[in-house]
Amino acid sequence: MLVARREACRSHCSQSSGSRKGRDRIARGESIIRMIERRKTRQVSVGGVPLGGDAPVVIQSMTSTYTYDVDATVAQIRKLAEAGCELVRVAVPEKRDTEALPAILEQSPVPIIADVHFHYERALEAIAAGVHKIRLNPGNIQDRRQVDRVIAACRERGIPIRVGVNEGSVVERKDKGKRAEQQSGLDSDYRGHMIGLMVETVEHYMRLFDENDFHDVVISAKSIDAAMVVDAYRAISERFDLPMHLGVTHAGPPETGRIRSVAALGALLAMGIGDTIRISYAADPIYEVEDAKELLCSLGLRNRVEPELIACPTCGRIEIDLITLTAEVRKKLATIKTPVKVAVMGCVVNGPGEAEGADVAVFAGKGKGIIYVQGEQKRTVREADMLDALYEETLAFAERVERGEVSLTKTRVNIVPPDPLPRSDGSIPLPVARQG
Ligand code: SF4
């Protein structure tokens, strides 16, 4: 009866273990997922952080403070770095911003990139202050000699330049004839023509860098349209072996921008395209770093260094407030710095099967939960104690891992579930745990 119920449950539970064929292949130790083959690009160094080539995909973000406010900017940079951000960009629209750079650079734990638009003087000031990279669109600086001066200053300091073409910036704004010609192309085939314009703009900028014999260049080609971002980067990466900075521009708040960003960046990274990523949100940039980390870990492009949380999506079998519990577990696990896999499951019907990849798991039922550590049933606790007990077991397990006494679960452990009979009302009671 329980088996039949479990099978029925699997079709409802989105944490399903996949097809029978897939499970058989996993059981035989075969990988059903091909490792992502990264596209080889030229490597540049950003303040000692390698970007491109065989370097891991680098996580970056941008401050939302006024750069001239040194204390606020440094505080945000530190917070981002602590969360796992490896490069931070700051905007320098005014002279007072570049004047703040030496103090920021002195206190920053990660390399700093100066974001320059329109005023080549800001670029020269930022370079002189010692920034580790600049972001510049040559098209925003009218005088070619000024662009050449910026390139010469970067060469002298040995720092790279990121050129970014955005969907919104490649259409001609001044030359009316050229604009009309572009517009008719865009009207007939917007997507195809826009990608053509983005590629042409990158080619134009690259000629400029080639003429200056400057090759430490990183490219970005952003749009708010995830599919356009994928097509633009694919087209550009076919033509250039320069490192790619991936991003979706003006993605919006995390609630909507997350899907847009992950759709585009996930697709590109899975194709091996992308050397650094910035997920951009209209929100505290800390979310950008958290999501970038999760994306790279989910694709196997970075190793986890912190706990991974698995939680069931809940369904009509749930007997506790699992959503609140999961949020609290997530917060509490943030203090642990070992990549332990923790599962929070809503029942003993499907939970054990779904949590077999976890090091520590709790299966919750009405008023209580049963905790397993690497397949071993540890204890049954009251609902009110579930959070603390799960944390204690996770911390104790993490400490044993750190002392080398146990290893993290590599594939799956065998969790033998309790075998309770459903009550007359259809709910499933949790048994009293064996003492362990
Ligand atoms: S409560 Fe959770 S684990 Fe149990 S069947 Fe529903 S979704 Fe799956």
Image (cartoon, rainbow, N blue to C red):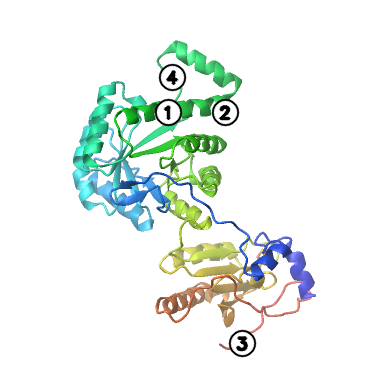
Above or below for 96 versus 295: above
Name the residue located 52 percent from the left edge and 68 percent from the top edge. Answer: 341
Residue type pointed to by label 3: Arg
Q: Which residue is mark 3?
A: 434
x and y, in percent, of residue 152 in the image: 24, 32
x and y, in percent, of residue 379 in the image: 56, 82
Q: Quadrant of residue 213?
A: top left
Foreground: disc 2 or disc 3: 2
Q: CA distance from mark 1 to mark 3?
A: 68 Å
Circles 1 and 3, Cβ within 8 Å, touching? The answer is no
Foreground: disc 4 or disc 1: 1
x and y, in percent, of residue 16 in the image: 67, 62
Residue type pointed to by label 1: Glu
Q: CA distance from mark 4 to mark 1?
A: 16 Å
Mark 1 vs 3, N-terminal side:
1
Q: Which residue is mark 4?
A: 172
Mark 4 vs 3, N-terminal side:
4
Q: Which residue is mark 2?
A: 191
Query: Of residues 158 and 169, which is closer to you in this image?
Result: 158
Element at label 4:
loop
Q: Looking at the rendered structure, which numbered label has been put on residue 203? A: 1
